[in-house]
Structure formats: C-alpha cells, structure tokens
C-alpha cells in the first residue's frame, strides 16, 4: 500500500501521461506484446469457427471423424499457437516492464545525485528510498498488466465484431449494442464500488498499523502491565473492524453483483435470441455456436480491465512521487551545466592557506543558514568549531566541502577563489568523516579502497593501523575481506568510526574535515581516535566540529558559532579566560538549575 | 504437514462460517459450469428441433438457464460476504495468538532474534496468513467437492470424456501449479536476497551522497545500483517467465481437452450411440469444467508461503517456557531503597556486562549513573525491569529496615513499584488520552490534565483543538522529541511509582525543550526514589549521588561536585556540546 492520498482526476491525467512517456524505454517491446496478445485473440476467433464448424458437421451433416479431421488438425495447430502466443506475450510484457523500471530507477537516481544531499534530507531518507525501491516496483503491474489490458479492451472486441459482422450482421448488432453497456454500467456502479473497495484496503491497512504498532511497543506494554488488556483490545478492534467492513462490503459487493449480473444477462440475451433464430431456421447452427463461443470472450477484456484497477491506482500513486523528484528544479542549472567544460584547472600542489570570505548561505524556505563568515586556516593544525545545534556548523562545512555550488567562490585556496568548475578537483583535496559515516554494503577492503582505488595492501594496513582499526580487522575471520552488512550492521559504533577514519587517512588529503561523534564511544576507542587525529593534525589541516572538551582543549583555534555567525575566535585558554561565549557554553549547563 | 494441521486447528472456532463460505463458493462454480453446458445443449436442441421441424419444450431449459444464472450471481454475492467474514474472523484469531505468544516470550528470546528484524518478519508472516483461508483453503475445498461432482455427471454421459477431463483437471489444477511453485520456491530466496541488496545499495547511495562526492565515487556507486537493480530484475524475470510459461501451458491443455472430447464423441454420434445434441453440450461442459480448478494454481503457489510463515510463528510459540510461579509477594507502594549485591551479568559467555556490582540506594534518594558506552548502564536498567533474568548476585528492595529480594515480587507488582522511562520510549499510535491510559487505565480526565500540567505540556495541550483526544500518529510522529519525553514522564507520574528509572532523559534535545523536560523531571522526582542514567550536568547537579560505572564495575560513588573537583576524566565525560 502506498500511503499517498488518492490523486484527483486532473492529477491522474498528468500522471498517466508521465507514465506513458516513460514507457518509451521499452515501447516497442510493449507494442510487440500487445500485438502477440491480439494475434492470440484472432487465433481464438479462428478456432471458435473451426470448433463450431466441426460440431455442426458431426451433428447435422452426419460427418464421421475422417471428414472433420481436416478441420481438427488446423484446430490443434491453432491451439498450440495460442498457448505459445499467450506465454510469449506475457513474457515480453514482463520484460518491457523490467526495462522501464530499470530505466526509471536510473533516471531518478541520477536526478537525485544532482539535487544533492540536502534535498534528500528535506524529503526524508526513508521516503526517498521507498520511492526508489518499492515505488518503482509498483510500476510493474501497471506496465505489464494494466496497459496491455487497456489495449485489449479496445482491440479484441473490435476484432470479434469485424469477424462477426460479415458472418451474421444481426448477431454483430447485438454485440455492438450491448458492448457499450458494460463500460457504461461499470461507470455507473463501478466507481462507487471501486472507491468502497479502495476504502476497504485502507481500513485493513489501518488495522494492520494498529497491530504492528502495539507489537513494536510490546516492551512498553509489559512495563505498563498492559499486555493482557491489550490482547482484549486487539480482539475487540479486529471484531469492530470486521463489523464495519462487512457493512461496507455489503454495498461494495452489491455493485459488483449488479455488474456481474449484467454481464451474465448480456450473454444470456445473445444465447436466447440465437436459440430462437436457430429454432425458426433463420440461422445455421455453425454460426449460432460461434456466436455463443465468442460472446463471453467479447465481454471478457472489458471485465478484466476492471480487475486491473488496483494495479492502475498503485502505479499512478507511485508515479506521483517520481514526477515530484524529476520535476524538482536543480539548485542552479546554469552553474551545474558548466561542469563539463573545465576552464580553469585547480592546480595547488600544496595548500598554504585556506580562507572563507564573506560567506552567506541560506536554505530556501527557511531562515537557517550562515551569514557573513570570514575565517582563515593555515596548512596544518586542528581547528575546532563549537556551538549549539542549529548554530550553522554543518551548513558551514557543507559550504566548505562544495555541496552548495552557489557560494563556492567565497572559498579561496592560497588566496585564489574557487569556481564551480573546480568543485570536483577541490573535493579531491579533502577527506571527510560525518557523525554517522556511511559504510557501503561491501567488504571492509572495498570500503577503504573508495578513498584510493589503487592502494596497495601495505597502504591499507598502514591506514588501518593509524586509525587503530588494524587489530580488530585482522581479528575478524575474513580480515579485510569481511563483508559489512547493511548500514554497517555487525560492527560496533566505535569500529565503524575507526574504519571511516582509516578510509580518510588512506586518502592522504591535505585537509581532513570531521564531525565528531556525540555518542559516548567506549573510552579506549575515544582515546585512540583522538590520538590518531591529533597526529594527523601535525602535518595536515584538520577542521572538526567538536562535541568534547578534550578536543577543544587541544585545538589550535576554537571557532564559536551562534545563529549562523562566528561570535568568538581564538585559543581555548584565552577564550575561557575572557569569560565569553565559550565559557558560557562549557559552564552554562552545570549552572542552569542551581 | 504438521504446520498445516496446526493452522487448521487455529481455524476451528470459525469452522461454521468457513464451511458455509466453501459451500456457497462450490455452488457458484457448479452453477457456472451448468450454465454453460445447458446453454450449449439448448442451442443445439433448438437448432435440431428447427431442422427437424418438430415442436420443442423450450420453457424448461430456458427456465433452468434463468435459474442457474440467478443461483450463480446470488451465491457469488453470498460467498464473497461469507468468505470475507470468515477471513476477518481468522485474521483476528491469528493476530491475537501471535500477540499472545510474543507477549509471553522473555526479552532475552526477543533480543536473540534481533527485534527490528523480528517485527518486520512478523509483519510479513501475519500478512501472509491473513489470506490463508481465502487464497489457500477455500480453492482447495471447492476443488475437492466440485471436481468429483462434475466428473460424475460427465461420466454419466461418457466415461472416456470424463477420464480425459479428470486427467486434464489434475494437470492444470495440481501438477502444473506444483511444478511452478517448486520453481518459484527456488527463486524466492534469491529474489528476497537481491531485493535486500538493491535496497542496501540504494540506501548507501542516498545516505552517503556527500562522502561519495568527496571520494569521487558517485558514478561508481550509481553504476553499482544499476547493476543491483538489473540483477534483481533478472531474478524477477525468471519468475515472470515461469508464470507466463505455465499460463500458456494451461491454455493449451484446456483447449486440447475440448478437442479431445470432440474426437472421442464424433464416432459415437456418427454411429448413433449418442444423441447429436450431446456433442455440443459435452464439449462446452468440458471447457467449463476447468472453472472448478481456476483458483487452485494460486492456492498451490501461496501454500508454501503460508506454511513457512506459519512455521516461523509456531516456532516462536514452541519457545514458550512455563514461568516459574514462585514470585507472588505483593508490596504496597511506599518509599523503597535498592541494594545491589555482587550482581554480574553476561550476554555472551566470558564477556561481563556487569561484574560483581554492589551499591546501595536509600529510599527517596536521587541517584545518577554515568559511564561510557559498554559500561553496563543499560544492563542495570534491564535487570531492574524484570524482563531480563537475573544471573548471579542479589538485587533487594529495602523499606522500613526490612530487605526483600526483588524477584520475590510478582512481575505485575514490580511494574507497579518501578516505572521506567526508556530512551526508546514507545508512543502508541492513538490519542494522548489513550497513551496516558496505557500507563494508568483508571486515570480520570482531571488526573491526566494534571499530569500534563506537571510535565509542562499544559500550554501545548491548550493549543490542540481536540485536547486529550488528539491523535499522535505512528510512533508519535507529530510530537517533537521533547514533547514525547514529557509525555513519557506524564505517564510515569500517573503511575506514581516507588522507584522512577530514567534513561538519558535529556539526550538529543535542543536547549529550549531541555529546559522544559528538566522542569518536568524535577517535578516527577519529588515523591520517589530516582535512578537516572544521564550525562547532563544540569541534571547531575540535582542528584544526591553519582555512581560512575566502568566496564561493569563501580569506578566511583560520590556527589557531582566532589567528582568535578577530584576527577578531570569525569569532567571530560560529562562535557558535550
């Protein structure tokens, strides 16, 4: 179930158009599948004729088996052909859907990498991931089943009419006049039924949510002594739900009852009229039997269309999320488009000085951001940034790392401003560790090699040793080849941190930027990491968002931020002695409630 | 097979509704088959009568057709209502049984199966069982009843045709689906695995977009996703093409059996041993008879899915051990102290989470616990909750110069005496009042509002149009972190426990809400003994004593001020910004 609200009619039209455009990735396959499906229907019509003719000959012309054999042989070939065509057609439509899904996923992913991390954070990781994974999968039934069935609902009845009319125009007329009645009737009662049906699924989802929510809070319920009570409650709610749903279903099924009754009636009407024409001899049995055989097949595609309604709605709801991502304007398209022509190469063999001049950046639709930042860093030493959450520390780092191309020219290396076209090269000079580093779903080795694809085993071991990770990596049964689970599963927080650190060290970048973990690692790890970083800072520039007293005590310079601005700058002891903002930050908390 | 029988046992209380549904479903199918066969006969007979220029009683067959059409539509309507009703009945039965099982499992067993994973699996399994009756049981019952009837009637006309039809029915309804389900079974595991890989790759890409850019690895990672997607799709294609193949084969067999019927009957009509109209009737009858096994293939495909889901659920049920009932003492709520005597705890053998821990907390004392991760703080709370078994050492309650082992009290009594505000406190999807009533079922509206006032939620509550009846959404989505902590404290206040245990109550809050939460905590602390894990200096300075744990042992016990002066490492431990 998608959680989206049901799109209204106008939206549905847009979304269907969007889905149609994206079917181009496998348009010819889809057409082929529909062509084969239609061919199958044509063979079905032909075999109906053969069956009717054979039966007619045997019944009324006193034919023996040898007489009808020339008819039965082609019939068996037709049947064989139908079986083949059906499975081919279904196979190809599945293939088409797969192609479309892969292309759609790729398009979305590429767009997302261009939109950048802050867009994804705004939308929520979980929601975006769902769109990419389940959302795209929900398109399968739309393309593989719903779209072909739309085509069949027009093509197959048409083919039957075209054959019936020359044979017996009166029967053709019956078909022609009853055919529109089914869609008409569907519209009359179907829409209400569909809505009720939809409502039923939603209610079921609500009940499911209730149950699983209580299951997740099981420990809480135990602590509240409430499990026995909850058990009764679940039984009661399920029962209430049953009563409520059944009263809805009584109506929902009534509409489909009417629909089905009507379809049966149409076939029966055809049968009765033909029966009497046969009786009065105005029609030969062969034709009459063909019409009887074809009558259910004539209405079938129209009825099947209704049964794919759910696939249609799922597809359309999922498309809404995709359209939103693809329609999102890029932060600054003129800037991004220049990325291919590299006009000026960033050529800095050694970074002597890094400076930020007059940097201001604000997120759209939000007053969060940084304003008027001026900072200078030398080529080595540790710089600590502190401030309360929301002070703009992360935004400042994002700007420095080049994730906001709009403001990249506020950053200068050796007193030369960076340009948008240099961002990629600039990022090669930086190693970066966020609070919660991402370890890819791959081996430890592959994760380290990300930083330096051609690194030797010796280099890997050195980097790991430097980060205090070598010991535990070697203790693992598969060593460096140990696969890391999803989200770094199977490793402790401290171990993940140390692998990320080793990865950063391996890059040997002149600048290391990191956001210190706030969580309490065990004291040994904390010490290890601290020492490793202090060592690195001797020869490189390290910029750290600090959360621990130890870190800022050892920093060359402390940068205190508040409300998106730098409010204090200097060495720890001087700033503490000045009893300014840093002093407050360090001591304020213990005095809050005295 | 045992699982199948156990599942059937679960169905037993609703046997009536289920059998009625099956009866109506069978009636529908039979009416449908009859309708087509009689129509064929009717047309042939009319044509024959027309040709022979004889009169014919067409009222009876026309009446039969009408009757069957009505029976078909009406019983279809009834069938859908009854079977859905039975489905819901069974669904409720299964959920209650699963919940009952899980609520009796000890937290150790739950933790062993990694709870997040367990709940995901449980969700899929319960959903798979929800439709057990509708998708698996019902088609089987319908086929078992209606196939013999159809074949018997057919055999009355011609035994050869009936035999041919029976074999074809078995093939389409049983053999083909079994082969398909075996194929799908093989690919299902791979499918799940590839799906998980794809999800992991996509998740890595989204999470690590910044790092990937810094390491110039975005393109490489996007390609990786493309490969994973391709891989998964290939696997899906195996399933889809198997299904397509099976569908084509079914069509082939259905049509060929009609052809076979024509071939068998033609000589009989030719030499006059069979009436000519019966050819039209029987060929349509054969075609329609496949209606009896129409939903059977799906049932055979769903069956292994349902059985393996049932297997996992029954496995949990089998893990249940009878609880030793020696804990039955009941203490009234009164000022209580706590005494830990040589308490040790190991999650895995040899690694001590707690190692001979001993300390004493006086009644009404406020005590903080500090320590790095892995120092045993959470284990301490787990042991006090009673949801984790004690391994060695003693935990005692002390009151009025008396001492009593904590595991002498019943679990129910223990929950009344001790209230825990966990860091992952669960806010239920429901209204504020419902959430508060989970803590105190008998609380009046005044008491609830009063509790909200005490935890500084009164202003917020006033702004809400529906007040206490405001829904909070899944996991308390509409609440800020600070608000959900305060709601948890309100729950604790309503329970009015003797001992209040808090786990990092101010962690992860911005300054504004930290202020509010702190006030709420100080209010809640007044009437009871308090044990709080915290590293917040503001809260620490309000505590009578600080117990500093390191690697499962007590490193120091002193007041916050004493530690600040004497231990520089302590200052580092509690200074985070």
Image (spheres, rainbow, N blue to C red):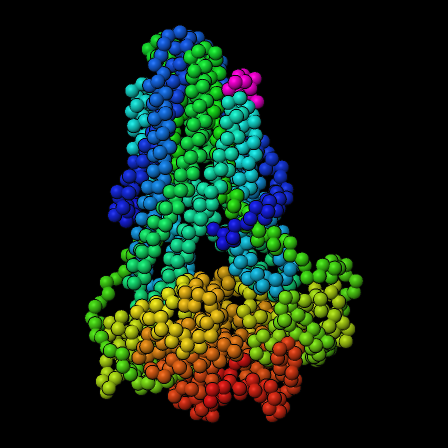
Could you tell me which residue is drawn at 28 percent across and 40 percent down?
A: B19
Going 72% across and 73% down the picture, which residue do you hit? A411
Using residue A200 as the reference point, say whether residue A161 is left or right of it: right
Asked if B399 appears above or below A521 in the picture, the reply is below
Magenta span of residues: A162-172
Taking depth in this image into account, of A410 and A230 the one nearest to the observer is A230
Name the residue rendered at 30%, 79% in the picture.
B498
What is the x, y in percent for residue A492?
A: 47, 69
- Residue shown at the point (36%, 84%) measured from the top left: B526
Q: Is residue B379 visible?
A: no
**Residue A105, x across and y down, in percent:** 59, 51
Q: Residue furthest right?
A: A343
Q: Nearer the viewer, residue B144 or B18?
A: B18
Q: Position of residue A561 (x, y in %)?
A: 62, 80
Q: Is residue B411 visible?
A: yes
- Residue B65 spot, x, y in % from top left: 36, 23
- B274 to the left or right of A167: left
């Amino acid at each position: 179930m998608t959680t989206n609200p049901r799109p209204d009619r106008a939206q549905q039209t847009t979304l269907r158009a969007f889905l149609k455009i994206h079917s181009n990735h496998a348009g010819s396959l889809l057409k082929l599948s529909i062509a084969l499906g239609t061919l199958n229907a044509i063979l079905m019509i032909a075999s109906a004729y053969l069956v009717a003719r054979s039966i007619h000959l045997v019944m009324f012309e006193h034919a023996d088996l040898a007489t009808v054999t020339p008819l039965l042989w082609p019939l068996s070939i037709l049947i064989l052909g139908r079986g083949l065509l059906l499975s081919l057609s279904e196979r190809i439509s599945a293939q088409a859907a797969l192609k479309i899904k892969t292309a759609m996923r790729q398009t979305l992913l590429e767009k997302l990498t261009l939109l950048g991390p802050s867009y994804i954070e705004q939308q929520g990781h979980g929601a975006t991931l769902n769109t990419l994974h389940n959302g795209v999968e929900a398109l399968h039934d739309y393309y593989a089943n719903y779209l072909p069935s739309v085509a069949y609902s027009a093509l197959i009845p048409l083919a039957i009419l075209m054959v019936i009319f020359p044979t017996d125009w009166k029967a053709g007329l019956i078909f022609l006049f009853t055919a529109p009645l089914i869609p008409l009737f569907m519209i009359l009662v179907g829409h209400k039924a569909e809505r009720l049906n939809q409502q039923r699924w939603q209610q079921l989802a609500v009940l499911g949510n209730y149950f699983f929510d209580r299951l997740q809070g099981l420990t809480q319920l135990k602590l509240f002594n409430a499990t026995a009570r909850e058990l009764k409650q679940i039984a009661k709610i399920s029962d209430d739900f049953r009563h409520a749903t059944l009263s809805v279903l009584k109506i929902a099924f009534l509409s489909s009852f009417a629909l089905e009754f009507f379809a049966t009636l149409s076939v029966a009407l055809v049968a009765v009229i033909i029966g009497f024409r046969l009786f009065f001899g105005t029609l030969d049995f062969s034709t009459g039997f063909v019409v009887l055989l074809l009558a259910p097949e004539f209405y079938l595609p129209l009825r099947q269309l209704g049964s794919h309604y759910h696939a249609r709605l799922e597809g359309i709801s999922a498309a809404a999320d995709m359209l939103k991502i693809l329609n999102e304007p890029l932060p600054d398209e003129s800037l991004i488009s220049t990325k291919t022509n590299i006009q000026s190469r960033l050529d800095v063999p050694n970074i002597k000085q890094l400076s930020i001049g007059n940097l201001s950046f604000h997120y759209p639709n939000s007053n969060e951001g940084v304003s008027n930042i001026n900072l200078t860093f030398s080529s080595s030493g540790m710089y600590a940034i502190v401030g309360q959450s929301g002070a703009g520390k992360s935004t400042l780092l994002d700007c420095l790392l080049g994730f906001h191309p709009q403001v990249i020219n506020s950053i200068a290396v050796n007193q030369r401003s960076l340009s948008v076209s240099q961002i990629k090269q600039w990022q090669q000079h930086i190693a970066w560790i966020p609070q919660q580093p991402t370890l890819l779903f791959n081996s430890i080795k592959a994760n380290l090699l990300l930083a330096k694809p051609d690194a030797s085993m010796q280099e890997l071991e050195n980097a790991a040793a430097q980060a205090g990770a070598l010991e535990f990596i070697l203790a693992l049964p598969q060593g460096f080849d140990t696969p890391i689970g999803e989200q770094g599963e199977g490793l402790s927080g401290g171990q993940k941190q140390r692998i990320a650190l080793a990865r950063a060290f391996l890059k040997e970048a002149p600048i290391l930027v990191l956001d210190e973990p706030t969580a309490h690692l065990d004291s040994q790890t904390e010490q290890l990491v601290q020492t490793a970083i202090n060592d690195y800072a001797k020869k490189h520039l390290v910029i750290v968002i600090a959360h621990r007293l130890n870190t800022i005590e050892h920093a060359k310079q402390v940068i205190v931020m508040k409300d998106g601005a730098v409010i204090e700058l200097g060495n720890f002891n001087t700033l503490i002695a000045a009893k300014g903002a840093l002093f407050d930050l360090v001591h304020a908390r213990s005095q809050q409630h005295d | 097979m045992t699982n199948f029988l156990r599942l059937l046992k679960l169905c037993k209380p609703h046997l009536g509704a289920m059998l009625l549904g099956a009866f109506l479903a069978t009636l529908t199918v039979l009416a449908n088959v009859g309708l087509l066969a009689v129509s064929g006969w009717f047309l042939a007979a009319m044509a024959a009568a027309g040709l022979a220029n004889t009169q014919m009683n067409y009222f009876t067959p026309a009446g039969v057709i009408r009757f069957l059409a009505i029976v078909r539509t009406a019983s279809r309507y009834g069938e859908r209502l009854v079977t859905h009703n039975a489905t819901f009945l069974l669904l409720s039965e299964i959920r209650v049984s699963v919940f009952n099982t899980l609520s009796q499992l000890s937290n150790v067993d739950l933790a062993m199966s990694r709870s997040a994973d367990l709940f995901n699996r449980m969700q899929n399994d319960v959903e798979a069982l929800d439709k057990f009756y509708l998708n698996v049981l019902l088609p089987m019952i319908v086929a078992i009843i209606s196939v013999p009837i159809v074949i018997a009637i057919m055999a009355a006309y011609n035994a050869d045709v009936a035999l041919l039809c029976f074999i074809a029915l078995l093939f389409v309804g049983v053999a083909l689906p079994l082969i398909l389900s075996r194929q799908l079974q093989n690919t299902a595991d791979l499918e799940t695995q590839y799906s998980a890989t794809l999800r992991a790759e996509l998740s890595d890409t989204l999470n690590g977009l910044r790092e990937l850019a810094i390491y110039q690895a975005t393109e490489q990672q996007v390609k990786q996703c493309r490969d994973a997607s391709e891989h998964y799709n290939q696997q899906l294609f195996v399933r889809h093409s198997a299904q397509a193949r099976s569908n084509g084969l079914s069509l082939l067999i259905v049509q060929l059996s009609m052809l076979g019927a024509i071939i068998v009957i033609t000589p009989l009509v030719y030499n006059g041993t069979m009436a000519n109209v019966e050819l039209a009737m029987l060929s349509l009858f054969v075609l329609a008879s496949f209606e009896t096994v129409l939903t059977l293939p799906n049932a055979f495909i769903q069956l292994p899915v349902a059985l393996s889901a049932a297997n996992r659920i029954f496995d949990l049920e089998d893990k249940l051990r009878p609880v030793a009932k020696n804990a039955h003492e009941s203490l009234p709520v009164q000022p209580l102290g706590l005494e830990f005597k040589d308490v040790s705890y190991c999650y895995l053998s040899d690694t001590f989470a707690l190692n001979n821990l001993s300390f004493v907390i006086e009644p009404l004392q406020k005590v903080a616990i500090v320590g790095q991760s892995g120092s045993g703080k959470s284990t301490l709370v787990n042991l006090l909750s009673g949801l984790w078994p004690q391994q060695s050492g003693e935990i005692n309650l002390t009151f009025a110069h008396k001492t009593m082992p904590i595991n002498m009290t019943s679990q129910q009594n223990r929950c009344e005496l001790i209230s825990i505000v966990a860091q992952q406190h669960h806010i239920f999807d429901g209204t504020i009042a419902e959430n508060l009533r989970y803590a105190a079922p008998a609380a009046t509206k005044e008491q609830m509002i009063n509790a909200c006032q005490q935890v500084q939620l009164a202003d917020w509550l006033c702004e809400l149009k529906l007040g206490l009846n405001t829904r909070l959404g899944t996991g308390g989505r509409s609440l800020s972190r600070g608000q959900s902590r305060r709601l948890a404290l309100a729950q604790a206040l309503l329970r009015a426990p003797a001992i209040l245990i808090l786990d990092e109550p101010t962690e992860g809050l911005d300054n504004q809400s930290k202020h509010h939460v702190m006030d709420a905590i100080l209010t809640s602390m007044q009437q009871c003994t308090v044990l709080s894990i915290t590293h917040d200096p503001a809260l620490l300075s309000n505590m009578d004593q600080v117990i500093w744990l390191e690697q499962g042992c007590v490193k120091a016990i002193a007041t916050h001020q004493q530690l600040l002066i004497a231990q520089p490492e302590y200052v580092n431990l509690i200074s985070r910004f």
